Image (cartoon, rainbow, N blue to C red):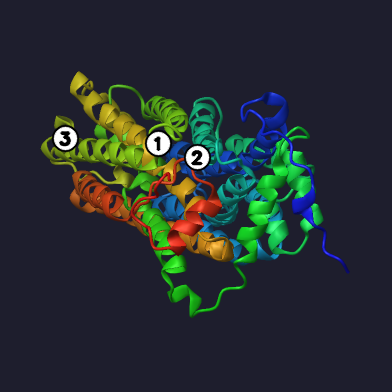
Amino acid sequence: MGQTNYSNQTNITEPHIFCFPSNAKLFLAVFSAVLGNFNFGFSMVYPSSAIPQLKNIEDPRLRMDTDMVSWFGSVFTLGAAAGGLSAMVLNDKIGRKLCIMMSGVPSAVGYLVMGSAQATWMLLLGRFLTGIAGGMTAASIPIYVSEISHPRVRGILGSCPQVTAVVGTLSLYALGLVLPWRWLAVAGEVPTLIMLILLCFMPDSPRYLIAKGRKDKALQSLAWLRGSGANYMTEFNKIEQSVATQGKISFLELRTPFYYKPILIAVGMRFLQQMTGITPILVYLEPIFNMTKVILPGQYDAAIVGAVRLVSVLIAASLMDKAGRKALLYISGFLMFLSTLTMCLYTHTNPLPIHYINISVTSDFIARQPETLLQAAPPSLITLIPLISTMLIIFGYAMGWGPITWLLMSEILPLGARGVASGLCVGVSWVTAFALTQLFMKVVDAYGLFVPFLFFSVVCVVNIIFTAVCVPETKGHSLEDIENYFRFGRVRSINTT
């Protein structure tokens, strides 16, 4: 059977990348995929609004104590780790698009279980299932978006998974102001169903299709994504050449710098991203504000922080292809260091308001006597410090260490190991998140809120050093160019020549 000679086909003039007719379908495909990240952000912070209600609920079968709150907040990350590990296999077996679609099953079932929960075990099961979905999308969507995007817009489109996750988070905080916890679970079903419907009409990644030998289908996919007026043949030939140089990798090949250096960088970034404490801060955001007695009610503070996070991640998206990845990582790490250190100093010097003295304040006590604690003394303007500090933590994270770790993971991992390595990154990330989320409330109850924030500030310094020593600048380079630089040993910087 003869092989089609794609290189002989006529090339067409390169389109303007932001020309709407040429990119409308690409944007639609990205939007369809990143709805999974919207659901991920929504489900991750679901406990922030649900915990205050479940700690005071009349039904003893659903009422939560400190240990149960810790499990309710952290079991999602266990599911995410399992989902990430399953995506290691599914990404390369069935493709990126189908893996994203499969995540809709545990997501829909998980929300259904939580919405109809009659006991705490059902809430934990629902959280675990939605975590599996989150882990699958976290390992699949960045790769799918990166592989279907043109190099000139890959930076801004590569930030879309983080942007939509932030929008999902903000939506949860906003809906939590008006909806009870059961209806919040019902609301989570909507983006899942829309995602599944839209993805039925979207193509799979051209790189994945070429790697599977389905070149005709890959060409159709690329033509659909770029538009009829685009010079997609040049890009197709370049992808084909890159894929041809990579086969199935062996264990011995993993020992070469071409494979192990980008994998270690990606895993290290996902590990350090979680070590900044972003997951427990987001999951327990409303309880944290209740503990620090911010002048506004906790649920309103959470919504404000969610809005700040959205603004900051949009700023980062606009700067991604202008300022570069490393510059934003430096800014992000520095802002997070200053704000976590401020939070540490404030909670250490002002551990509790005056009316907390001589009271053993645990989460159980707060649950039993919320009105007494809230009414004992009016909050002062100084309590705006933890609100502002938390806003800066979220702002700094969303400027760099949030979106760029997702983007760089999809950019620097070699194609031959991209599916497996992305699953490994997500697995490491969420195992770390589970440990932090499980321990956070217990450490706060035992030692005070300043201890975890002191730890997070130290991690931010480590992140700045890691960025300087290990992270390459990938702005403006195609995935094939990035692979070639790792192949020839240039890790710390990628030249533009």
Single out the residue that lies furthest toward the bottom: 252
Quadrant housing the C terminus: top left
CB atoms of marks 1 and 2 within 8 Å:
yes
Is residue 293 in sight in this rendering? no
Quadrant housing the N terminus: bottom right
| Alpha carbons under labels 2 and 3: distance apart | 30 Å
**Amino acid type, residue under disc 3 in the picture:** Tyr
Identified at 68% across, 31% down, the residue is: 23
Residue position marked by numbered label 3 in the rendering: 346
- The crowd level at tag 2 (other Cα within 10 Å; few <14, some 14-19, many 20+) is many
Residue position marked by numbered label 2 in the rendering: 162
Q: Is residue 407 above or below residue 242?
A: above
- Helix, strand or loop at mark 3: helix
Q: Is residue 85 above or below residue 129?
A: below
Relative side of 205 to 82, left or right: right
| Alpha carbons under labels 1 and 2: distance apart | 8 Å
The residue mark sitting in front, 2 or 3, is 2
Relative side of 70 to 185, left or right: left
Q: Position of residue 28 (x, y in %)?
A: 69, 34
Q: Nearer the viewer, residue 62 or 473?
A: 473
**Amino acid type, residue under disc 2 in the picture:** Gln
Residue position marked by numbered label 1 in the rendering: 398
Q: Earlier in the sequence, mark 2 or mark 3?
A: 2
